[in-house]
Image (cartoon, coloured by chain):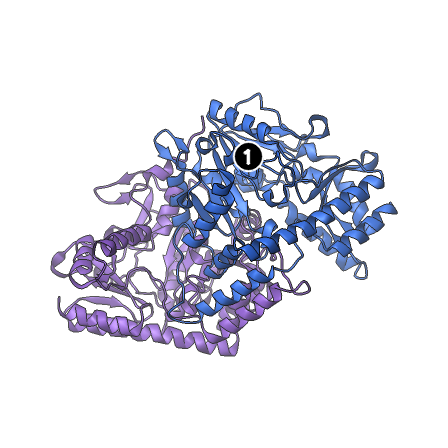
Chain colours: A blue, B purple
């Protein structure tokens, strides 16, 4: 009789955002007239930029003619896109990343979930707490997390690095030495980040202890401050200890268009084995490339016109971030993030639990947010709002907050 | 110090088609004037059907306006697509599959590689030999295959079910009882298939021994004979033992467009746990949906116009299949497949090894095929050609075969 992977059964509840979507749908069904403002899931709302739309149309036309039709994509992704990424995202920032160290994918969520596969099941992972739940959940599925303690809401084999107002949301080096360190910078959910010298300390630490950093830079386009690096490869020595994940979802509005990439430098090795060769084997065996027309759309983001348009889009969302930050501040909330990230992280009022505040906001003012505790135990007592709504809805949400 | 998943190191060589692509590229570089005819990798060559192109343009326009823009897709995929699939692919054939048992994905390759994750590492897998290499390779990566014997080219913990001319390419029930049985029907690479009653025997066997069948039906659109089922759910009792994988790659030319789906009936359980709940958890946690515009393109395949157009495309490739089958037969080759599948499977002449014949064909007549041994040890001495070229190239290839 076949058996299941019972690591799955250890997972408490469903994936955070599936869970929230279910709750909101049930509430909306019970209150059909209620107008909800969704500042919960980090989903964009602005249409794709005109240059991207034009390129998509062109690529669709190519697929309609035998002489320009495209079948299976090259294993790592189309060279035109990898070259543009290598040049604009890395070489122009002084990072020595080559096009053949870049793997095009259908998004950073998949990559951040799949990357753990190339590592030993015995490795210990360390995560910032709170953080994007995919890192821990996928390590639970792989059997790398140990057992779950419902009391502390922690996994026995996961090393948690608390990031709270007390330490300015800067993780300390853990007392136990990890093998794999997940860093999501700028951070989801806290919206906080690391300066170049703070990140350099992490790179030095990883190289010293022989750990690999999975650096999720999905929000790098939202960085506004000079001393915050856009890539971990701006730090010296990162090529021998870091894998970087990037997404088109948040900088170009591709949440429903699906494109991302992962950088695995060839200098990153375990003994004689390059992690690049392992990821290439996984990519070639278990994946079959992002659609041609989507890769072309990604390429449009690197044209002069495309760059300018998506920059405007990021600015649009960052105006929302400022609006929320100022609005909540004026309403007396303790607020973090929102300067180098599209997320605003707030302390719940009157020591309410994160989920109580979720229910309260939904029911009293019709605003959907994300409970901080969903991102890890140190997120308890916090709450996340996103800047990805429309400006009008963001203003409306701030009006509603005034009445709390 | 972090460690790697050393199951990866057990894999001999690279993924079959990456390997062939590398060999062909090297040959072409050394012989730039040589005109190669590619009948190796199963990649389509005909442009997307007009109805699909129109729909893609419409969907792109939707993405360009705030009121029709789409962000993250629903976890299982858009309901419009799942409803069309449930109705046309299943209910109209008498299969009791519901829309919420269908999971939209970016293709059958990914699903066939990922599906093993929801099962215990201790489970024994059985595969037809020869078969599409992803099944074995991904189980090796997961640590389910044991050790590799280079002499026999087999894995110690994999149960092989030889399919050769001697047994008419019909697998026998294995002597050791498997937990997971991969069936690719119509078969890649042999192009052969099972009748309804033969498949019913497999369903009964699986239900009897408590095994689950991973039924890869990527080529069902190529079935021409009446007594060959298009879905395993045409067999009685399949809902309690089978997962079915489907692809848009081969029936609608989506190899470079990327769309597929997996059916996990809610009646399929291990004890009290439904495999549906596990796959839903994986889908929600490690995947973020196929692009909206691609899901719309898939939907176009179910319109009357779209159906007719993709049917014509399948007929175009099947004319190639007949051309190859008849051409090779006339040239004295022993030929199989090509009636219910776009693959032609031939015995190499003069007991040549599969790879020797690959090199011979490439060098002597400039035809790229796929060595049978790449699909498993019982594929040795066989060779695969695909019907996915243009008709003109297929005719030209047959001319070249005459001169061997």
Q: Quadrant of residue B79?
A: bottom right
Give the residue number, with chain letter if any, for mark 1: A182
Kindly indicate the quadrant of the structure image that contains residue B162.
Answer: bottom left
Whether residue A141 sits left or right of residue A275 in the image: it is right
Q: Residue furthest top?
A: A175
Quadrant containing the N terminus of chain B in the rendered view: top left
Task: Give B123 or B286, whichever is nearer the viewer.
Answer: B286
Q: Secondary structure at mark 1?
A: strand
User: What is the chain letter for disc 1?
Assistant: A
Taking B209 as reference, is B227 above or below it? below
**Quadrant of image for the C terminus of chain B:** bottom left
Q: Please provide percent x and percent y for residue B400.
A: 18, 69
Residue at 44 percent across and 62 percent down: it is: B247
Residue appearing at x 49%, y 71% in the figure: B53
Instruction: Let me know if residue A301 appears in the view.
Output: yes
Q: Name the residue: 67% across, 62% down.
A: B66
Q: Position of residue B148 (x, y in %)?
A: 29, 40
Residue A232 vertical position relative to residue A286 in the rendered view, above or below: above
Q: Nearer the viewer, residue A311 or A156?
A: A311
């Amino acid at each position: 009789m076949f058996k299941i992977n019972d690591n799955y059964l250890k997972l408490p509840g469903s994936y955070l955002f599936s869970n929230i979507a279910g709750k909101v749908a049930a509430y909306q069904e019970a209150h059909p007239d209620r107008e909800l403002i969704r500042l919960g899931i980090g989903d964009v709302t602005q249409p794709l930029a005109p240059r991207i739309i034009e390129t998509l149309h062109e690529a669709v036309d190519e697929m309609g003619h035998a002489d320009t039709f495209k079948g299976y994509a090259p294993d790592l992704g189309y060279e035109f896109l990898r070259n543009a990424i290598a040049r604009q995202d890395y070489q122009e920032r002084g990072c020595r990343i080559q096009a053949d160290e870049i793997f095009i994918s259908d998004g950073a969520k998949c990559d951040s979930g799949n990357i753990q596969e190339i590592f030993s099941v015995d490795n210990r992972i360390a995560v910032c707490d709170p953080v994007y739940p995919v890192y821990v959940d996928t390590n639970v599925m792989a059997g790398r997390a140990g057992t779950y303690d419902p009391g502390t809401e922690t996994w026995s084999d996961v090393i948690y690095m608390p990031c709270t107002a007390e330490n300015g949301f800067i993780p300390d080096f853990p007392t136990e030495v990890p093998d794999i360190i997940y860093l999501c910078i700028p951070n989801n959910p806290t919206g906080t980040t690391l300066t170049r010298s703070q990140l350099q300390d992490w790179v030095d630490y990883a190289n010293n202890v022989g750990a690999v950093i999975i650096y999720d830079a999905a929000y790098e386009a939202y960085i506004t401050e000079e001393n915050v690096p856009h890539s971990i490869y701006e730090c010296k020595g990162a090529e021998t200890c870091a894998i970087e994940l990037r997404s088109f979802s948040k900088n170009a509005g591709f949440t429903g268009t699906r494109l991302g990439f992962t950088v695995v430098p060839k200098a990153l090795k375990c003994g004689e084995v390059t992690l690049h060769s392992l990821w290439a084997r996984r990519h070639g065996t278990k994946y079959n490339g992002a659609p041609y027309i989507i890769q072309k759309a990604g390429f449009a983001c690197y044209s002069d016109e495309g760059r300018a348009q998506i920059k405007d889009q990021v600015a649009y969302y960052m105006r929302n971030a400022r609006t929320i930050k100022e609005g909540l501040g004026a309403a007396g909330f303790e607020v973090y993030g929102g300067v180098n990230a599209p997320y605003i992280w707030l302390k719940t009022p009157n020591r309410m639990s994160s989920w109580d505040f979720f229910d309260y906001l939904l029911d009293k003012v019709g605003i959907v947010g994300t409970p901080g505790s969903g991102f890890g135990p140190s997120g308890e007592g916090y709450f996340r709002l996103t800047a990805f709504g429309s400006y009008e809805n963001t203003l409306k949400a701030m009006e509603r907050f005034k009445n709390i």
